[in-house]
Image (tube, grey):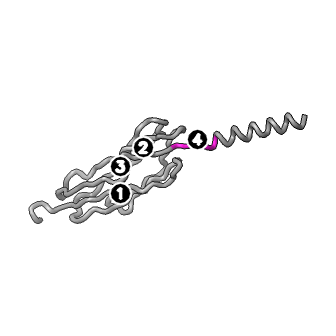
Amino acid sequence: MKKIVVVLFMGLMALSLQAQEKTAKIQFKAETVDYGQIEKGSDGIRVFEFTNTGEVPLIISKVSSSCGCTIPKKPEQPILPGQTGEIQVKYDTNRVGPIRKAITVISNADTPTKVLKIKGEVKAIDGK
């Protein structure tokens, strides 16, 4: 009887270890978006596309930027395995000068914190 209990216990432990190995994985098409040179007041919206390459739904719990001039928007629904999603970023293009900002993504992925970057330069229109 003791042997049966030990074998069952070992089997349950093996199953629980396998269940813990299943995770969501986030794979971005690109981790940096280059705005290039854009004019003041132009469209500041860009998108980071990603795929859940894991085995469980990907839940993005928080997306934040390094300053108030950059507003990220995360997906509200879980991203199922194999599906794609996007994180939208809006930069305030009324600020003339170089763009160097970081966007931090927190999720249930195997790498729970990911830092994305935007770069570029906003030029004044006709030197104004």
- Mark 3–mark 4 distance (CA, rounded to whole Å): 24 Å
Q: Quadrant of residue 121?
A: bottom left
Q: Which residue is mark 1?
A: 117
Mark 2, other Cα within 10 Å: few <14 / some 14–19 / many ≥20: some
Dot 4 crowding, Cα within 10 Å, few <14, some 14–19, many 20+: few
Stretch in magenta: 19-24
Q: Report the side of 59 relative to 46 (left or right).
A: right
Q: What residue sits 69% from the left and 38% below the top?
A: 15
Disc 3 + disc 4, Cβ < 8 Å: no
Which amino acid does the dot numbered 2 rest on?
Answer: Pro
At label 3, the amino acid type is Ala
Residue underneath mark 3: 30
Secondary structure under the numbered disc 1 in the rendered image: strand
Rendering coords of residue 81 (x, y %): 49, 36
Which label is found at residue 1? none
Circle 1/circle 2 CB separation < 8 Å: no
- Label 2 vs label 3, nearer the camera: 3
| Quadrant of the image occupied by residue 50 | top left
* Tag 4 and tag 2, C-beta contact below 8 Å: no
Residue furthest to the left in view is: 126
Task: Check disc 2 and report the residue beneath it.
Answer: 75
Give the Cα separation between the discs numbered 1 and 4: 28 Å
